[in-house]
């Protein structure tokens, strides 16, 4: 038996305030669409319940996640920590979250990580190397998102393979 607490839903917020789910959703997306008094009630209910919006519906409907996948071969190498920090200095102000995957220099694990990040509908993917499995290359070509390869600016890019 699991003792995991149930995550508060949009419906829970609506019930607490006494409005419809659509009204809460409208308020959270564009606060100007509801009165200030109602906005205050909804924000208070969100705070009280600890509600965290579920971005999955937005990702599905807009085909945009505002997330960028970053694959690094090592989390213990300080170089990659600096690379991640540099990426986030650019992506965060632009409204993007980074989803980091570690693959331990394994081509098979990199392939699995690419598949996993792509399943979250990331808007772009940053790879630390330019050697990839055939399946990884195929996935990256199929999704039609920007693919950036870093750490090797001499070898041919993925698009040329």
Image (cartoon, rainbow, N blue to C red):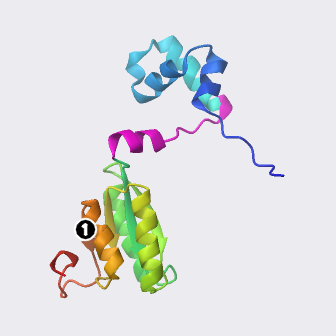
Residue 135 percent location from the top left of the image = 35, 76
Q: Is residue 70 above or below residue 6?
A: below
Residue 37 percent location from the top left of the image = 52, 12
Picture quadrant where residue 92 is located: bottom left
Q: Is residue 114 above or below residue 21?
A: below
Q: Is residue 71 above or below residue 4?
A: below
Task: Tell how many labels.
Answer: 1
- Front in this rendered view, residue 159 or 32: 159
Q: Does the segment drawn in magenta span residue 57?
A: yes
Picture quadrant where residue 67 is located: bottom left
Q: Does the segment drawn in magenta span residue 58?
A: yes
| Image point (26%, 70%), residue name | 148
For label 1, count other residues whose C-alpha is less than 10 Å away and answer few (under 14), some (14-19) or many (20+).
Answer: some
What residue is pinned by disc 1?
Answer: 141
Q: Is residue 103 above or below residue 8?
A: below
Q: Is residue 123 left or right of residue 24?
A: left
On-image quarter of the C terminus = bottom left
- Front in this rendered view, residue 89 or 4: 4
| Image point (37%, 39%), residue name | 61
Q: Is residue 69 left or right of residue 24?
A: left
- Front in this rendered view, residue 38 or 127: 127
Residue 69 percent location from the top left of the image = 39, 64
Q: Is residue 56 left or right of residue 5?
A: left
| Image point (36%, 50%), residue name | 66
SS label for mark 1 = helix
Picture quadrant where residue 132 is located: bottom left
| Image point (52%, 82%), residue name | 76
| Magenta segment | 48-63
Residue 104 percent location from the top left of the image = 49, 84
């Amino acid at each position: 038996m699991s003792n995991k607490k149930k995550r508060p839903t949009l419906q829970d917020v609506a019930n607490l305030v006494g409005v419809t789910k659509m009204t809460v959703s409208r308020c959270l997306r564009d606060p100007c669409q509801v009165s200030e008094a109602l906005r205050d009630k909804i924000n208070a209910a969100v705070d009280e319940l600890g509600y965290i919006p579920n971005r999955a519906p937005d990702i599905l409907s807009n085909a945009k996640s505002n997330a960028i996948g970053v694959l690094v071969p090592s989390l213990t190498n300080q170089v990659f920590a600096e690379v991640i920090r540099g990426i986030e200095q650019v992506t965060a102000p632009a409204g993007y979250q980074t989803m980091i995957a570690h693959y331990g220099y394994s081509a098979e694990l990199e392939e699995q990580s690419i598949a996993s990040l792509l399943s979250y509908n990331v808007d772009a993917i940053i790879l630390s190397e330019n050697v990839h499995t055939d399946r990884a290359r195929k996935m990256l070509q199929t999704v039609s998102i920007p693919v950036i390869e870093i750490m090797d600016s001499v070898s041919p890019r993925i698009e040329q393979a």
